[in-house]
Image (spheres, rainbow, N blue to C red):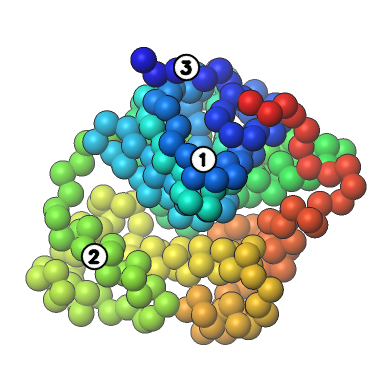
Amino acid sequence: MARALAPGEFYGSTTSVRVADAILSEVTHYERRTLPAHTHDWPYFSVLLEGSYVETTGRTTIDYQPLTAVFHGAHLTHSDEIGAEGSRFFLIELGPSWVELAQELGGIPEHMFELHGEHASWLGLRLYHEFREAESRRNASAIEELLLELCAYLPSAPPPERDEPPWLARVIDIVAADFRAHYDLRSLAEKVHVHPSHLARTFHRFHRRTIGDMVNGLRVREACRRLAESDATLTEIASESGFSDQSHMTRAVRRLTGSTPGAYRKAMRKESWPAGAGPKGATA
């Protein structure tokens, strides 16, 4: 039988903050491990900050890479495989008032799905920046506004069962393998033997964004990963992530994460926390 985890309770080393009827938590697993099947009492969003992770519920499996963002419905049974290097997550659990608001906006999903698009995929990261602030500097109003934006996204979530054409997965694999290069819609359509306009419409229907949005998001994700994990210069990271130059990368990172590359790098490194900064909470 799946174990039911209470709000704020997670496997791994957990630090949590309760604010605005939500629980914000940072959860760290230090090594490879398999988590037993479990559920969570509150619906929540998760963003992988470091490491890797595979999560499965029913017929849906999501392979997390850094900055993958996912929504989970309440009481959803799932099992998890932590990668060899461990993982670090940021999680946003929605309390009753947010669930009620989401219902008023059009409903709250009961399934698990990955967040896509330039807007929704990065709201969790902006919340993480607020979470990392010292309590005296944490902006409760900004947190509430970001939670409102997250809840407003939920009614447009993809349905739990989608009959995607098999060639669409190949498109994603092709783009993900070579996101640093300039992509051409016509050549991409030729590789999967469909018309370019059909490719564009079908991709948007199932993924709620354009292929260009996906490419840009992958480049920003790679840039953010390297900002957090390496000491390379911004110019080097921009080039290696597929951007034309540093200013192009700066605009894209700021638009998606709410921070400049330099500020993002500083915020994501634990050693940069000032004395007394960061959230406080118990390990669960």
Rendering coords of residue 76 (x, y %): 38, 24
Q: Would you say the residues marked 3 and 2 are in contact, meaning their CB atoms lie under 8 Å apart?
A: no
Query: Which residue type carries mark 3?
Result: Ala
Q: Residue at x 80, y 57 (%)?
A: 272
Rendering coords of residue 227 (x, y %): 63, 67
Quadrant of residue 200 within the rendered picture: bottom left
- Report the disc number at residue 171: 2
Q: Residue at x 35, y 57 (%)?
A: 209
Q: On the image, numbered disc 3 is attached to which residue?
A: 4
Rendering coords of residue 44 (x, y %): 50, 31
Quadrant of residue 198 within the rendered picture: bottom left
How far is disc 3 from disc 2 in space, using C-alphas?
38 Å
User: With respect to residue 87, does 169 lie above or below?
Assistant: below
Image quadrant holding the N terminus, namely: top left
Query: Which residue type carries mark 1?
Result: Ser
Instruction: Work out whether residue 61 can be spotted.
Output: yes
